[in-house]
Image (tube, grey):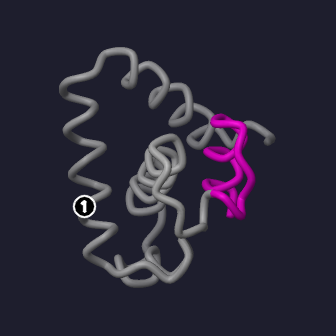
Amino acid sequence: DYIQKTVATHYSISLEDLKSKSRKRELVTARQIAMYFAKKYTSHSLKSIGGYFGGRDHSTVIHALQTINNMLDTEPHFKLSFQDIQRRIKFKVPV
């Protein structure tokens, strides 16, 4: 929940949007980042992480992890935004 709230706040979207079936680019990116951090900072399975994001399949979570890793390697401005969110999550900055 904390990860979802932190990412949603960073991107100025609602939790409902983060979990929605929408494929709008800004929502997809935020959702993929939240999935990435859920995998990194929790012990939940890929299936249960997918469940927290609107009942998505484990393969969707795998795709999100790959996409975020690719973006971190190729997009410097994305990496800065990612690091800001990561810092907030690591140090439990209040949302």
Q: Residue at x 54, y 71 (%)?
A: 53
Mark 1: secondary structure: helix
Q: Is residue 54 above or below residue 18?
A: below
Q: Position of residue 92 (x, y in %)?
A: 69, 43
Q: Residue at x 51, y 46 (%)?
A: 30
Q: Is residue 46 above or below residue 25?
A: below
Q: Main secondary structure of the magenta part?
A: helix
Q: Position of residue 31 (x, y in %)?
A: 50, 54
Quarter of the picture containing the C terminus is top right
Looking at the picture, tell me which residue is in the foreground, 15 or 36: 15
Residue 54: in magenta span: no
Left or right: residue 68 compared with residue 4: left
Residue 2: % across, % down: 69, 56
Residue farthest to the right, as pictured = 94
**Which picture quadrant has residue 29?**
top left
Position of the N terminus, as image quadrant, is: bottom right
87, above or below 41, in the image: above
In the rendered picture of this protein, how many numbered marks are placed on residues?
1
Q: Is residue 12 left or right of residue 78?
A: right
Which amino acid, by three-letter code, is at mark 1?
A: His
**Dot 1 alpha-carbon crowd within 10 angstroms: few under 14, some 14 to 19, many 20 or more:** some
Q: Return the residue at label 1.
A: 63
Q: Nearer the viewer, residue 12 or 7?
A: 12
Q: Give the residue drawn at x 74%, y 53%.
A: 14
The residues colored magenta run 1-17
Identify the residue shown where x is 35% and y is 76%. Answer: 46
Give the percent coordinates (x, y) of residue 34. 50, 53
